[in-house]
Image (spheres, grey):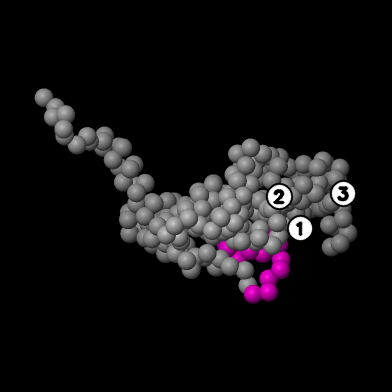
Amino acid sequence: MTDPQATPRLPQAWRYTAERAVAFFSVLCLNWHDGNVCTRPAGHKGKHRHSLKVAWTVVPPLTEARQIASDLRLSQEEGRRAAAILAGAAACEALAEDARSDGPLSRRAIYHYFQEAGAAGIEGVLLALASYLGKFAGPAPAEAWNQRLDAAATLMHAYFETPEEAVRPVPLVTGDDVMHALGVPAGPVLGQLLKAVYEAQAAGEVADRAAAMAFLRRALDQG
C-alpha cells in the first residue's frame, strides 16, 4: 500500500529532464555578474548598432559558460545555447541603455539583435530583465526599469507578433533575380548585396521588389 505521506517521485525521464534544466540554469547564474553588462565607450553618440557589436564581441563569460556546462555534463549544444543566452542578455541590456539617448528601438536594431541571438533571443531578453532586478535589494529605479520593460516588450512583440517585418521577413529578391537583372555573378559580392538589401527590407527602407532592385542598383553604382 502506498504511503500518502511519502515524497512523490518523478518518472526517471522527468527527473533527468529536470536535473538538466537545473544544471542549464546554473550555467546562466554562475556566469552572469556585473562585468558582463556592456556599456558604451565614453563619448559614444552612435545608434543601437554600435552597442550591439560591443555586446556580441566583448561579453566575457561565453567560453567559461561552455566549460561550466561541460563540467555539469551538459551537451556542447546546451553549452552553446547558454552562451548565446548570456550574450543576448548583454545585448538587450545595451539596447535598453542606448534607448535613453537614442529613443525607441528601430527595426534595424531589432533585426540585428535577432540575427545575432537567433533562437536564444527571447531567453536573452528575460535574463536581462531578471539580472537587472537582481542588482537591487528593493524595487529597481522606476525610470530605468520602465526603459528595460519597453525594450523587452518591443523585442518580444517583434518576435511573436510581427516577425515578418524586422525579425525574419520574406526576401523581396533572390540571388537569381540579382544575377539575371543586374548581371552580378555568383560570389562574395552577390552575397554582400543580398545581405544589404535584406537588412534594408527589415529596417523598412524597401517595401517591394522594385524598391529592392533600385536599392541594389544604387549599391552597385556606389561600388
**Considering the image in quadrants, where does the N terminus appear?**
top left
The residue lying at 65 percent from left, 40 percent from top is 163
Q: What is the distance, in whole Å, between disc 3 and disc 2 at their CAs? A: 21 Å
* Res. 158 image quadrant: top right
The one nearer the camera, 49 or 67, is: 49
* Above or below for 1 versus 123: above
Horizontal side of 167 relative to 210 (left or right) equals: left
| Contact? badges 2 and 1 (CB < 8 Å) | no
The residue lying at 58 percent from left, 63 percent from top is 55
Give yes or no for residue 49 being in the magenta stretch: yes
Q: Is residue 155 visible?
A: no
Residue denoted by label 3? 214
Horizontal side of 68 relative to 149 (left or right) equals: left
- Is the residue marked by circle 3 packed among few (<14), some (14-19), or many (20+) residues within 10 Å? few
Residue denoted by label 2? 107
Nearer the observer, disc 3 or disc 1? 3
Q: Amino acid at mark 3?
A: Ala
The one nearer the camera, 127 or 10, is: 127
Start and end of the magenta stretch?
A: 42-56
Q: Which disc is residue 99 wearing?
A: none
The residue lying at 71 percent from left, 42 percent from top is 165
* Res. 42 image quadrant: bottom right
Residue denoted by label 1? 189
The residue lying at 58 percent from left, 58 percent from top is 144
Which element carries disc 3, helix, strand or loop? Answer: helix
Q: Amino acid at mark 1?
A: Val
| Contact? badges 3 and 1 (CB < 8 Å) | no
**Sequence-earlier tag: 2 or 1:** 2
Q: Total label count?
A: 3
What is the chief secondary structure element of the magenta stretch?
helix
